[in-house]
Amino acid sequence: MIQVENLTKQYGPLVAVRDVSFTVSTGEILGFLGPNGAGKTTTMKVLTCFMPPTAGRVTIDGMDVFEKSLEVRRRIGYLPEANPLYPEMNVQEYLTFIAGIRGVAKAKLGDRLDAVAAVCGLKEMMRREIGELSKGFRQRVGLAQAMIHEPDILILDEPTSGLDPNQIVEIRNLIRRLGEEKTVILSTHILPEVQATCDRVLIINRGRLVADGTPHELTTQFHGDEQIQLEVRGTTGDLLKSALATVPGIVWLEVADGKDVTARITAERGSDLREPISRCIVDQGWTILELHRERTSLEQVFRQLTSTEEGADA
Amino acid sequence: MRNAWLLCQKELRSYFNSPVAYIVLTVFLLTTGFFFTSSLFLYDQATMRTLFSLVPVIFLFFVPAITMRLLAEEKRSGSIEVLVTLPTRDWEIIVGKFLAAWGLVIVAVLLTLFYVLSLSMIGDLDGGETFAGYLGLVLLGGAYAAIGTWSSSLTRNQIVAFIISMAIIAALYMVDDLLPILPMSLAPVLQFLSTSYHYENISRGVIDTRDLIYYASLIFLMLYLAHHALASRKWK
């Protein structure tokens, strides 16, 4: 279990992280979300014992990250943001070196190398020099490095950056699999990634924690206006407009003529107008080709939270 | 200590995996070989003394070239972040890197044993003097490698690291040359600080514990400072 209490980190006059508190329980996949420069990487650097907090306390399994630093570091696997590697080494040499310092027993080393090579898709690359690898493969080497010692906790700073869409899906599946037993903290500014992989989301903006909850909680808590997408056959835009005018609760209506008429309807918050709208259209004898309510996405929540904060600060 | 050894092996492998080691060793052997043989037949004496007075000057460029990347490159690429978040102590990192650089210096010095071998075949070489000279070189190389390790810990730019270590090495080597222009009372202090004074003592064949302690404490001080620089990220 990871406990962060009132974490503050200052670089000179710049406050990178302000009074952030959260806990992560074992087996949870936590997504750290925020615009660039929000303080995600700084928080991770404190969690991984790279540098101490200016104020506050971080404990992992009850051990302070600075008093029991070595013990804490043994339990963590860390993939830093830039994924720095040694280009002159080959993959096997590099992973063997990391495993050595990680204290992986000699007898287990071969098994571990095979295992991480298999899950990270590095089997054919083990003898290649790291400097020759593509960015995607280097990212996999970074991931392999982070889990060579089977850590209880994985801290991954933007694990899917530089990967192609297929690889992103693979890595996400891998993270989800790992998250069944291990605690995973990953940071990203790619929102679908969080929705696809994380049990819980923290949104951080300008060094402050602005939201904490499951993706579902956040989207219901911070929902915006209801949006309904509609496509109707057998009418014209003007006719549709006047027909929909009878439905109460519509805030804004936009229609576009074409072979079929499409409309974009903005309704009052928290209302569900699908039923009255469909009844109104069917009553007119027209055909509904599409009627679709757009759910508030995490993206909208994110934009709402990170832009209002900026407004408040300014 | 096990981690320091693992790091040292990794560094040595990096030297020999990249062209660095081969280039510096070749240049080192070419320059020493050239100056050594060109004067050898002039003196017509079977002695290694010319080599022993030559190598400290070559070390001025050679050792900083070896040590400049040790920490500066890790800082530039960011791999220092992976390194210090591994379960290893900061001093193990410093010691491992220093040992690797010293090891490469020692390899270079040992390669000049070919000269010793060829000389001993054609003339009568003083074994004691030669041994003392080599001991002096190894110790001097150690002190320089430690200076280079510290310089490399101060910056993320290898060129800056190279220049800083060269400046410190030159200053410490030549500090006793300032004697004529400074008050006499400072003489023992400057002499004691000078690497060349202690080096010459040892090369003469007088192995005095004071000279050994001097080198040991210089190495220790430099590594302590390097450790301090590495740990500076932990300042709140």
Image (cartoon, grey):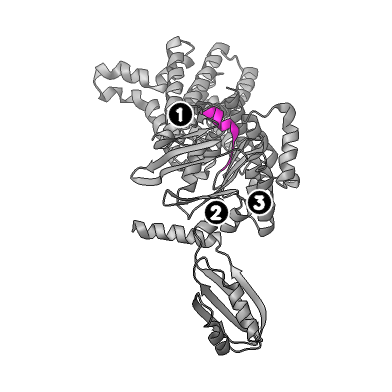
What's the mark number on residue B227?
Answer: 1
Residue A245 position, x and y percent, is 52, 83
For marks 2 and 3, the one nearer the N-term is: 3
- Asked if the magenta segment contains residue A197, the reply would be no
> Which image quarter holds the C terminus of chain B?
top left
Task: Decide: is A26 above or below A235.
Answer: above
Q: Neighbour class for label 2 at 10 Å: few (<14), some, many (≥20)?
A: few
> Which image quarter holds the N terminus of chain B?
top right
Q: Give the Cα distance between marks 2 and 1.
A: 47 Å
The residue closer to the viewer here, A93 or A216, is A216
Q: Which residue is mark 3?
A: A172
The residue closer to the viewer here, A269 or A195, is A269
Residue B228 position, x and y percent, is 42, 29
- Residue found 60% across the figure and 48% down from its top: A199
Q: Disc 3 sits on a residue from what chain? A: A
Q: Secondary structure at mark 3?
A: helix
Q: Which residue is mark 2?
A: A217
The amino acid on which the numbered mark 2 sits, given as a three-letter code, is Glu
Q: Disc 2 sits on a residue from what chain? A: A
Q: Which residues are magenta?
A: A69-79
Q: Which one is in front in this view, the residue at disc 2 or the one at disc 3?
A: 2
The residue closer to the viewer here, A1 or B233, is A1
Task: Decide: is B159 above or below A228.
Answer: above
The amino acid on which the numbered mark 3 sits, given as a three-letter code, is Arg
Q: Give the Cα distance between marks 2 and 3.
A: 21 Å
Please identify the quarter of the rendering in which residue A52 is found. top left
The amino acid on which the numbered mark 1 sits, given as a three-letter code, is His
Q: Are marks 2 and 3 on the same chain?
A: yes
